[in-house]
Image (cartoon, grey):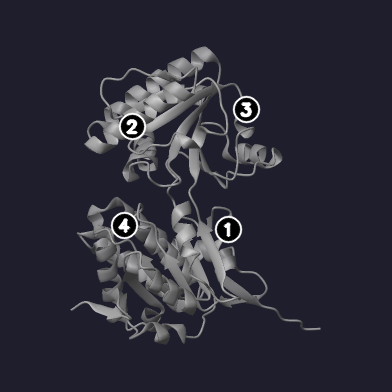
Amino acid sequence: MQRNFNGIDILYAAADSFEEVKALPSKRIFCDEVCEFLNHLSAAIRKDKEACQYPDIVTFGFFCRRANIEQLKKRYNREGIRIGRGLAYHIAPSNVPINFAYTLVAGLLSGNANVVRVSTKDFGQTFILCRLIHAVIEELKLDIGKYIVICQYKREKEKTDYLSSLCDLRVVWGGDNTITEIRKSEIASRCIEIAFADRYSLAVFYAEDVLKIKDWEDISRRFFNDTYLYDQNACSSPRMIYWIGNKETIASAQELFWKKFHQFLKERYTIEPIIAVDKLTMGYRAAIDFEDAVFVEREDNLINRIKIGTLDKCVPLYACPGGSFLEYEDSSLERLFSIINKKYQTLAYLGGDGRAIALQVANAGCAGIDRVVPVGKTADFTLTWDGYDLVDIMSREVFVDTQ
């Protein structure tokens, strides 16, 4: 029988009310019980046949394993005492099913009690993880279960008002419009809010290095996970490919890369009719708006490539799900830096040196690009996201003066 608190459907809760969760004491960051829970949840995911059918759940389970959590913990092994802020209210996005689990983990590791509102879409990942969380808590009789509430409700302002009035930390994952609507619900004066808005991501391909690739199966899988796994809906999914090299090398690298990737893709991806129409519409828009745009011929509509000869700040407007890419060619990154604004989140690289690229971004004083990662890792969750150190922001330091 499904439970509800204050008219809000509950998918998982060990507590009996939101008020009970609100009254829970904060915990130290990376407390032993949380780390133990996550490790057992990781093991439960690996053993569950239904969970293993979802690559994103498997990846989440890998993230939660003891070795990774201990590695993350080392970063926070410094002087000072940090504990949770209290009750964290998370609003998960509707386009990335597994995101709710990662924001929950960040809240737990930061020492908070957590209420997570998940999408009303019937994502299998949501219900599988709620089932496994319940099983692990019940088996181990962990008190940490009371620090987790996973709920679901439609966009009803009065319910958002209520949960916002209780929280000490509000975490909003969603587009700009979602954030605007959520902010109509007031929070307490000392409540902290973190909002993850609409972002745009791209990839930099070094043509000479692309031509040297030997394992095309691996590279294709990595690029597929970055893009088509979430239908290019994730804010971290590359939507523009910035090619670096001379004209001849780039032409050869493009022909090879897209040929190999298409061979990999056509056996694994089926495009929805509405997405095919959207991709075609976006391509026509780009052809009209960019005087030098070239719509690359293709044998099917799995991959849309639009080559552009100029860059300007309107590039993020040409974002479309399902495998649509702008392509630009240059001999260096300098031109790219001139259009980077706060809209840009992740820069993936294929070839080249990640640290050198990150240093160029920093030295150029770019307003955007918060992450520089290899192709294949754009969707990998870390405790630093959109430039925020989540544990630091989600917790508070108890200052001690010993002199």
Q: Amino acid at mark 4?
A: Ile
Depth check: give the residue in front, 317 or 75: 317
Q: Amino acid at mark 1?
A: Tyr
For the residues labelled 2 and 4, say whether their Cβ atoms are less than 8 Å apart.
no
Q: Tag 3, which secondary structure?
A: helix
Q: Residues within 10 Å of mark 3 (few under 14, many from 20)?
A: some
Q: Is residue 45 left or right of residue 382?
A: left
Please name the residue that numbered disc 3 is placed on. 335
Q: Amino acid at mark 3?
A: Arg
Q: Quadrant of the C terminus?
A: bottom right
Mark 4 or 3: the one toward you: 3
Above-or-below relation of 254 to 60: above
Q: Is residue 245 left or right of residue 224?
A: right
In which image quadrant can residue 6 be found? bottom left
User: How far is the residue under mark 2 from the one under mark 4?
Assistant: 28 Å
Above-or-below relation of 369 to 240: below
- Look at 61% across and 69% down and name the residue there: 77
Q: Residues within 10 Å of mark 1 (few under 14, many from 20)?
A: some
Q: Residues within 10 Å of mark 2 (few under 14, many from 20)?
A: many
Please name the residue that numbered disc 1 is placed on. 388
- Look at 27% across and 32% down and name the residue there: 276
